[in-house]
Image: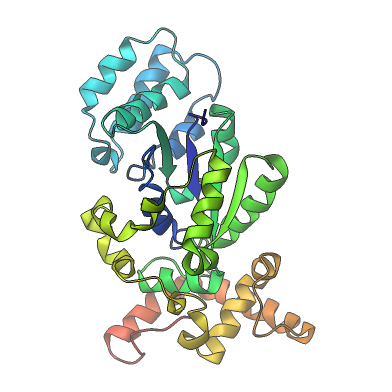
Amino acid sequence: MADQAPFFIVGAGRSGTTLLRLILAGHSRLHIPPETWFLRPLVRDFPLTGALTQPQVERAIETMVRHERWPDMHLAADDLRRQAAALARPALVDLIDLVYHHLLNTSSRQRLGDKTPHYFAIVPELATLYPRAKFIHLVRDGRDVAISWIDAGWQRYYEPGFEWPAAIARLRMDRTAYPDRTLEVRYEDLVRHPAEVAQHICGFLGETFEPSMLGWQDRIELVAARDRHLHARLRQPLSDDAIAVWRHRLSTAECFAMEACLHRELVQSAYKLRFAARGWQPLFRLTAGLLRTLAPVLRHGIPYLQRRRMLPKRVYL
């Protein structure tokens, strides 16, 4: 019998986790709801094991229902409070399971996957809460991730909020700490060979591959309307055009700047550098240090100059 434990799809944002969600959501047994988000503050603020006190239960519930993503769960806050009140000495995982069970019950599926990319940062906590949970890390070339973040108006690759390097570091640790519970999936492989990758993931989860999973374009409505502008490519057939975007999008200077900031993780992830010679290393350090120092100025200065048409619309510095 297939495992009923939850699984988690994690990785830096803009790495293809939504595509993977739509593929897996085509499985007759699997339900992958909208991103939950509130587990991160929960595991930060409350004990992972043992019964919670009544004040802790009340605070944990408030953390969940006051989160901006809570409406996506389609569970009334008062209903959650009533269900929590009926539990005897609940632990944190019991409160989370109230939401997970609700999501499963409304889906008529048997197993839940949580696709909240930035949960890569709390994999150890999730592994404690769910000792049989499995973790699918989606990895994409950091240069393509950086381009996508900038196009979306998010942090630039030299700013502290850019999470791709941390996601790569977390994957390396998880492969050591949870070797049987961690699966690395490359975005590039998913685009080129979706059937083979889906079969591999199903094997990892102990599920049987279903060809209907590959009709992800019929499930675009699962993406929240507010986020669909970020995922316009999902309506198009998969193409190599989505791979190594940096090769035709970045100028030589922009590529050098990105590799200066991301080269360590790119090499660790077996992505080839354009500036691979060892002689570039001192200039890498200098460039990365300069960009990180100037990050607050660039954060405001680049859009300012773009609005005044003194810089092109797309600048990847």
Is residue 224 left or right of 240 when viewed as pictured?
left
Identity of the residue drawn at 33% across and 16% down: 84
> Does residue 213 sit above or below 98 in this rendering?
below
x and y percentages locating residue 152 in the rendered image? 35, 69
Q: Is residue 316 visible?
A: yes
Q: Position of residue 222 (x, y in %)?
A: 27, 50
Is 228 rendered above or below residue 176?
below
Q: Nearer the viewer, residue 75 or 151?
A: 75
* Residue 271, percent from left and from top: 64, 72
Residue at x 37%, y 30% (from the top left corner): 100
Residue 61 is left or right of residue 124, and the answer is: left
Is any atom of residue 163 visible in this view? no
Q: Nearer the viewer, residue 58 or 250?
A: 250
Q: Quadrant of residue 123?
A: top right
Residues 301 and 106: in front is: 106
Image color mode: rainbow
Q: Is residue 35 above or below residue 85?
A: below
Q: Residue at x 42, y 19 (%)?
A: 56
Residue at screen point 58% across, 81% down: 257
Spot occupied by residue 209 in the image (x, y as percentages of width and height): 47, 47
